[in-house]
Image (cartoon, rainbow, N blue to C red):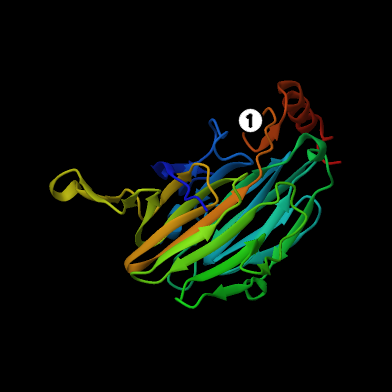
């Protein structure tokens, strides 16, 4: 077994999206070869309703899948096919946009005004870009959770892990999407197939990932001075960890424990033509999609 070296650690950047939602973007709208088949990861965590209630009004998608995982609050959604519903804490929606869909997502806080969740975009290969749209709505209670002897806890949204399989199936990139918590002071290795691209996104606690021979620990850095000073958790909260090749990762939790998403998938390795919420293989296909939006033939 070989430990995957850590290529790079990136802090999620503040971003304004939708009708004015303040969120953090771990990656997206750039060169995504290192995370292929994934395109974008947003962390929409906020305790101020005025920063998220405007939501994500009606907008199109084509050529991708969107994966929404809610940890606090809820997200009400609706689409051009007549689907309506709401996701609560612990729930997942895996939407295959395929040939095209118009939808909206409107976040609502919990009783304390807190909203927290993630949205991941996965690319579709050329052969499935124009497939029929579909949803997989999964309640939190239906997501298997396994706990190892040392207390390490893993929720399995998609893919197989430790002999259990997540409820989301039939996804083109055959991804594995895990929510991992390692107890305080514990060291763990977690397997990942060597052929996959993989990343972790840290969102709670503290710890380190080992770079084969040396640890990459949480480092807290004070930025600014006086009243304007802020503490940035460079490899802890809201940090994206990109891994190189290997067949497992090694992690050590700090005094508070360590929680992160661990996502991996088979690279598609096809050209990407991308504008906003539509991702195709060529500029001509993009132009056709937007022309169809203009003339009312986008929904198939």
* Nearer to the camera, 14 or 249: 249
Q: Residue at x 76, y 30 (%)?
A: 289
Q: Position of residue 127 (x, y in %)?
A: 82, 37
Q: Residue at x 49, y 45 (%)?
A: 20
> In this view, which residue lies farthest toward the top?
284
Is there any visible trace of residue 18 in the rendered image? no
Q: Residue 295, relative to residue 240: is it above or below?
A: above
Residue 172 shows in this picture: yes
Q: Residue at x 71, y 22 (%)?
A: 283
Residue 185 lies left or right of residue 228; in this view the side is: right
In the depicted view, which residue is nearer to us: 127 or 160? 160
- The image quadrant of residue 154 is bottom right
**Disc 1: which residue:** 275
Residue 136 versus residue 178: which sits nearer the camera? 178
Q: Position of residue 241 (x, y in %)?
A: 44, 47
Q: Is label 1 in a helix, a strand or a loop?
A: strand
Q: How many marks?
A: 1
**162 lies above or below 196:** below
**Residue 176 at what x, y percent from top left?**
63, 56
User: Compared to 281, does 3 lie above or below?
Assistant: below
User: Which residue is the extreme one toward the right?
Assistant: 300
Q: Residues within 10 Å of mark 1 (few under 14, many from 20)?
A: few
Q: Is residue 160 left or right of residue 35?
A: right
Say which quadrant the C terminus sits in: top right
Using residue 178 as the reference point, say whether residue 169 is left or right of it: right
Where residue 214 appears, x then y in whole percent?
A: 33, 49
């Amino acid at each position: 077994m070989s430990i995957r070296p850590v290529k790079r650690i990136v802090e999620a950047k503040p971003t304004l999206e939708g009708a004015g939602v303040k969120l953090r973007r771990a990656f997206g709208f750039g060169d995504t070869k290192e995370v292929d088949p994934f395109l974008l990861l947003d962390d929409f965590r906020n305790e101020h309703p005025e920063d998220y209630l405007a939501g994500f009004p009606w907008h199109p998608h084509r050529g991708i899948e969107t994966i929404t995982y809610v940890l606090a609050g809820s997200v009400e959604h609706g689409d051009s096919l007549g689907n309506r519903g709401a996701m609560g804490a612990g729930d997942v929606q895996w939407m295959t946009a395929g040939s095209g869909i118009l939808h909206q997502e409107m976040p609502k806080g919990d009783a304390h005004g807190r909203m927290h969740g993630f949205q991941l975009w996965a690319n579709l290969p050329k052969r499935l870009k124009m497939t029929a749209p579909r949803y997989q709505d999964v309640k939190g209670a239906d997501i298997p959770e396994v706990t190892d002897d040392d207390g390490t806890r893993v929720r399995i949204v998609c893919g197989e892990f430790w002999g259990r399989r997540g409820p989301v199936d039939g996804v083109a990139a055959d991804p594995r999407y895990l929510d991992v918590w390692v107890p305080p002071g514990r060291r763990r290795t977690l397997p990942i197939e060597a052929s996959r691209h993989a990343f972790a996104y840290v969102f709670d606690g503290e710890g380190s990932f080992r770079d084969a021979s040396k640890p990459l620990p949480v480092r807290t850095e004070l930025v600014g001075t006086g009243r304007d000073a802020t503490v940035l958790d460079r490899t802890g909260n809201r940090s994206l960890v990109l891994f190189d090749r290997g067949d497992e990762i090694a992690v050590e939790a700090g005094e508070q424990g360590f929680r992160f998403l661990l996502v991996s998938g088979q690279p598609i390795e096809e050209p990407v033509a991308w504008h906003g919420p539509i991702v195709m293989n060529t500029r001509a296909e993009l132009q056709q999609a937007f022309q169809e939006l203009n003339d009312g033939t986008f929904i198939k």
